[in-house]
Amino acid sequence: MSHRPFIARSALMGLLLVATGTALAATDDETRDWRRWLRMFPNIAPATQPAYLQECGSCHLAYPPGVLPAASWSRILAPESLADHYGDDASLPDALVAELRGYLMANAADGSARVRERAFAVPGAARSDTGLPRITETPYFIRKHRRIPARLVTDNPEVSRFSQCNRCHIGADRGVFDERQIEIPGLGRWKD
């Protein structure tokens, strides 16, 4: 009769108790430092594909693929949608569209394991009166931005639209959209 399983189980329980005690004993300063450290990491995977960064990022923020579901990206990349891409002609060669489509589909919100990206994955939520999906019309985006007064964004000439994520979210290009890393041009740090 071996006592090894009992010893292993006891050792594991001891480690868990020590870890729990350490976490509970952390001071507010230590907790604040830990949260600050965590905020350095992306909560939405940033755009990384070179062709996407070049083609889309040359006109606007290369939005992270995880902020729209695959069906929305597919609609945006349709030839007629690119010909009238939110008021601009963004037509691209078929081979490049296929490359971008592959990247965006593989990294879209509805296929992500990231919690914040999955929040953008509500089917049909990005529908727009203008026909093309809009990140700013997703329920998640609306909920996260509902308390921000228009004077800070749409009435602010340095921002002008909610679609200009990188104007206020200082880590947007790295996928960091943390609420504590918002700096509104002309106002400074956002305090909710």
Image (cartoon, rainbow, N blue to C red):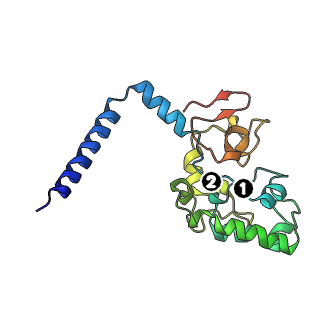
Residue at which label 1 appears: 48
Q: Residue furthest left?
A: 1
Q: Position of residue 83 (x, y in %)?
A: 87, 68
Q: What residue appears at the point 28 percent right and 43 percent down from the top-left corner?
A: 15
Q: Position of residue 21 (x, y in %)?
A: 28, 35
Residue 77 in view of the camera:
no
Q: Position of residue 38 (x, y in %)?
A: 52, 39
Q: Amino acid at mark 2?
A: Ala
Q: Position of residue 52 (x, y in %)?
A: 78, 60
The kind of secondary structure element at disc 1 is loop
Up-down relation of residue 54 to residue 191 (above or below):
below
Horizontally, residue 27 falls left or right of residue 162, namely left
**Quarter-of-image position of residue 47:** bottom right
Q: Amino acid at mark 1?
A: Thr
**Quarter-of-image position of residue 147:** top right
For the C terminus, which image quadrant? top right
Label pair 2/1, CB-CB below 8 angstroms: yes
Judge the density around disc 2: few (<14), some (14-19), many (≥20) Cα neighbours within 10 Å. many
Judge the density around disc 1: few (<14), some (14-19), many (≥20) Cα neighbours within 10 Å. some
Q: What residue appears at the point 58 percent right and 59 percent down from the top-left corner?
A: 120
For the N terminus, which image quadrant? bottom left
Residue at which label 2 appears: 45
Q: Nearer the viewer, residue 154 or 105?
A: 105
Up-down relation of residue 7 to residue 23 (above or below):
below
Residues under labels 2 and 1: Cα distance?
Answer: 9 Å
